[in-house]
């Protein structure tokens, strides 16, 4: 399974999954249709699935036009997003599986950013391969999504599910927010040398206009403050030893950054 990253809008990414043996493709969170249609034309591929993580317009904006071009494509989304995702036919819950080509993804229910948010995790097929996580706006490189419909408790539980995945997992988040996220992280975790090194690397990448996505989950665990709510240094920074309170205070600080 090849993964193609399509930059759109101001800082969104669409991910197109391609199986060359079958000449089929699926797409994760198509904010717009035209870049996807162009890529499909270049690949001479048929679109068979649209995997949505949540209902926000910059994740489902291309659904209708893509279905007009490929009416046989199936639209997947969270069960609790019923009525909010254009063309949705499959309503997924925690523990469900979806198949694309020879790969099968596990569905994770990860509310917090929205009440219905899900993620798709493709585990490795064989030794030496890595897992692929499509997490929408729940986990970002160096950050996490705002809490529009969910609670801090939900978000900690959701991020905990993602944190439990193998360190080698590639994180395909939907926005290029990494540099700003790490700038914030340095204001609260300034003694973290892994974070310092990552910031310098990301800064250089963005100066070269390179994408920072995907990131590695192991790196997120070392440098992303929103996966480190149980670290004594961060708990001391916000004066709380409670995981949810620590996360909530960090998220509130980021909202004002």
Image (cartoon, rainbow, N blue to C red):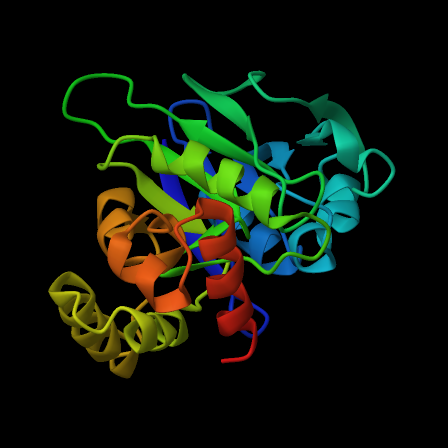
| Front residue (pair 246, 128) | 246
Name the quarter where the N terminus is drawn.
Answer: top left
Judge by depth and name the residue closer to the eye, 24 or 95. 95
Q: Is residue 15 left or right of 197 when viewed as pictured?
A: right
Residue 94 picture quarter: top right
Q: Position of residue 91 (x, y in %)?
A: 74, 24
Q: On the rendered structure, is 51 left or right of 18?
A: right
Work out whether residue 118 or residue 233 is closer to the camera in this orientation and state it: 233
Instruction: Count numbered badges in the picture.
Output: 0
Image quadrant where residue 204 sits:
bottom left
Residue drawn at x 12%, y 66% is 193
Q: Nearer the viewer, residue 115 or 207?
A: 115
Residue 51 screen position, x and y as percent: 61, 36
**In percent of the image, x 46 and y 42: which residue is there?**
159
- Identify which residue is drawn at 44% across, 30% down: 121
Q: Where is residue 53 drawn, in percent x and y? A: 61, 41
Q: Is residue 141 visible?
A: no
The extreme right residue here reads 83
Relative to 17, is 141 above or below? below
Apparent side of residue 82 relative to residue 187 in the rendered image (left or right): right
């Amino acid at each position: 399974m090849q993964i193609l990253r399509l930059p759109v809008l101001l800082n969104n990414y669409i991910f197109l999954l391609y199986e060359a043996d079958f000449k089929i493709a699926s797409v994760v969170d198509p904010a717009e249709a035209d870049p996807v249609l162009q890529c499909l034309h270049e690949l001479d591929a048929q679109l068979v699935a649209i995997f949505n993580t949540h209902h926000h317009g910059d994740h489902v904006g291309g659904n209708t036009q893509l279905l007009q071009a490929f009416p046989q494509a199936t639209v997947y989304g969270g069960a609790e997003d019923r009525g909010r995702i254009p063309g949705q036919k499959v309503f997924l819950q925690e523990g469900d599986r979806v198949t694309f080509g020879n790969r099968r993804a596990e569905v994770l229910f990860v509310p917090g950013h929205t009440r219905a948010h899900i993620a798709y995790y493709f585990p490795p097929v064989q030794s030496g391969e890595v897992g692929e996580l499509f997490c929408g706006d729940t986990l970002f490189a160096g950050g996490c999504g705002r809490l529009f419909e969910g609670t801090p408790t939900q978000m900690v539980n959701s991020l905990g599910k993602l944190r439990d995945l193998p360190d080698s997992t590639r994180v395909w988040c939907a926005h290029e927010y990494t540099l700003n996220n790490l700038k914030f992280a340095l204001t609260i975790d300034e003694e973290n040398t892994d974070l310092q090194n990552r910031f310098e690397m990301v800064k250089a990448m963005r100066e070269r206009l390179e994408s920072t996505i995907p990131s590695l989950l192991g790196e997120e665990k070392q440098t992303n403050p929103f996966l480190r709510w149980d670290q004594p240094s961060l708990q001391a920074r916000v004066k709380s030893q409670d995981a949810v309170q620590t996360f909530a205070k960090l998220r509130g600080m980021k909202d004002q950054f």
